[in-house]
Amino acid sequence: MHSLLEDRFQLKAKIETRDLPVYALVVASGGIKMKEVKPDAFPPPGEQPVPGAHLTRLRMTAPNQFTATAWPMGRMTDWLSRFCEVGNRPVVDETGLKGNYDSVLSGVGQHAPAPGDAERSAAQEATVSLFAALPEQLGLKLVPKKAPIEVLVIEKIEQPSAN
């Protein structure tokens, strides 16, 4: 893929590490409020999981309610980075937690409501700030700071060449 982009678009790019604004995910002062669990293995393709299997997943279980099952902390930071409230800042894990956790996060809106869709906007409107919900509901906190982050720097790109 890299050589195709170089040939067709005259792309010149590199990876650099820069100190950028991030949110550090840390354990809040009262400690975590999530249950550490051991995930069950996913069944082979084509087979149904055993009833009651504890499989790693994150799903929306009600408007503005997210239920995580056996969710690893490393994936929690990736997911939190997608919330519009963090303003496109990456979230980095500084919790020191290595396990998988069950949790429910309620009242938060992951995306900004769609303009012009009042019914959907009302259903998606957050009732609590992510910054307030995390300590209260999960025992985690987002702290603004700067951290070294790898970024893709595009030095040159042109219109594609003819086929």
Image (spheres, rainbow, N blue to C red):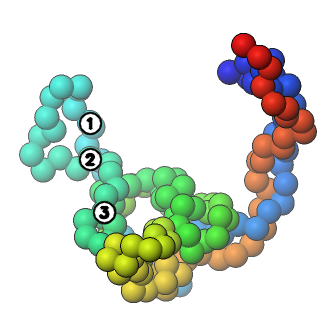
Along the viewing direction, whichever of 34 and 20 lies nearer the viewer: 20
Tag 3's secondary structure?
strand
Residue highlighted by disc 2: 55
Tag 2's secondary structure?
loop
Give the Cα distance between marks 2 and 1: 7 Å
**Foreground disc of the pair 3, 1:** 3
Mark 1 or mark 2, which is nearer the start of the sequence? Answer: 1
Seen at 78% across and 25% down, the residue is: 160
- Residue 42: image tag: 1
Task: Tell me if label 3 and label 1 are in contact, CB under 8 Å.
Answer: no
Q: Please state which amino acid type lies under the numbered disc 2.
A: Leu
Residue highlighted by disc 3: 60
Mark 1 or mark 3, which is nearer the start of the sequence? Answer: 1
Seen at 53% across and 81% down, the residue is: 131
Tag 1's secondary structure?
loop
Seen at 77% across and 17% down, the residue is: 162
Q: Position of 52 compared to 20: left or right? A: left
Task: Tell me if label 2 and label 1 are in contact, CB under 8 Å.
Answer: yes
Give the Cα distance between marks 2 and 3: 15 Å
Residue 46 place in picture, x, y as percent: 18, 25
Task: Tell me if label 2 and label 3 are in contact, CB under 8 Å.
Answer: no
Give the Cα distance between marks 3 and 1: 20 Å
Residue reaching furthest to the right: 155
Mark 3 or mark 2, which is nearer the start of the sequence? Answer: 2
Regarding residue 146, the answer to whether it shows in the image is: yes
Q: Please state which amino acid type lies under the numbered disc 1.
A: Phe
Q: How many marks?
A: 3
Quarter of the rendering containing residue 63: bottom left
